[in-house]
Amino acid sequence: MKVLVATARTQGEREGDFNWCVEGELVWIGLVCASDQADPDGGRCGCGRSFGGLNSHRGTTTAMVRDLPGFTHADYVEALRSSLEQQGWPPGLAESEADELLELARYWPPGTVVERRLDTISVRVFAGHERR
């Protein structure tokens, strides 16, 4: 199953990059505060341009598509449910969140690095096409 995980690859390529997640942990796309909604690059917290780590509950501006053999849809939903509950979000959102994240990850091959600007996910590095 292809999923999005935190990565430090391409960090520093864009001003304002940050990576406080654990390398390789599953990520999700959280809600955006009013400040970042107005300007994801000028907001105080960076939530409009970051992915959130399911275990660390920290943020990163880069995520990588990774294939996790043996990892099931039920595993993914449970990982999201547990993280949402720990963070005070409604755990009932887990299945729809999992479906949306899986839909995103299915478009790119493993190794592709993506970034986020509000509701737009863009490729930084397409797998197999490294920048020099």
Image (cartoon, helix red, strand yellow):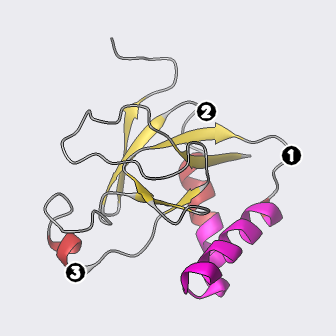
Residue type at mark 1: give it: Gly
Query: Does residue 72 show up magenta in the picture?
Result: no
Up/down of 16 relative to 93, above or below: above
Label annotation for residue 89? none
Residue located at (56% from left, 61% from top)? 56
Residue type at mark 3: give it: Ala
> Mark 1 highlights which residue?
70
Q: Which residues are magenta?
A: 74-98
> Mark 3 highlights which residue?
34
Nearer to the camera, 57 or 98: 57
Residue type at mark 2: give it: Pro
Residue located at (63% from left, 73% from top)? 83
Disc 2: CA contacts within 10 A as few (<14), some (14-19) or many (>=20): some
Look at the image and tell me whether residue 95 can be seen: no
| Occupied quadrant, residue 85 | bottom right
Residue located at (33% from left, 66% from top)? 47
> Mark 2 highlights which residue?
110
Decide which of tag 1 and tag 3 comes sooner along the chain: 3
Residue 38 at x, y percent in the picture: 15, 72
Residue 128 at x, y percent in the picture: 51, 18
| Magenta span: chief secondary structure | helix
Q: CA distance from mark 2 to mark 1?
A: 15 Å
Decide which of tag 2 and tag 1 comes sooner along the chain: 1
Query: Does residue 79 show up magenta in the picture?
Result: yes
Residue located at (30% from left, 63% from top)? 118
Residue 62 at x, y percent in the picture: 41, 44
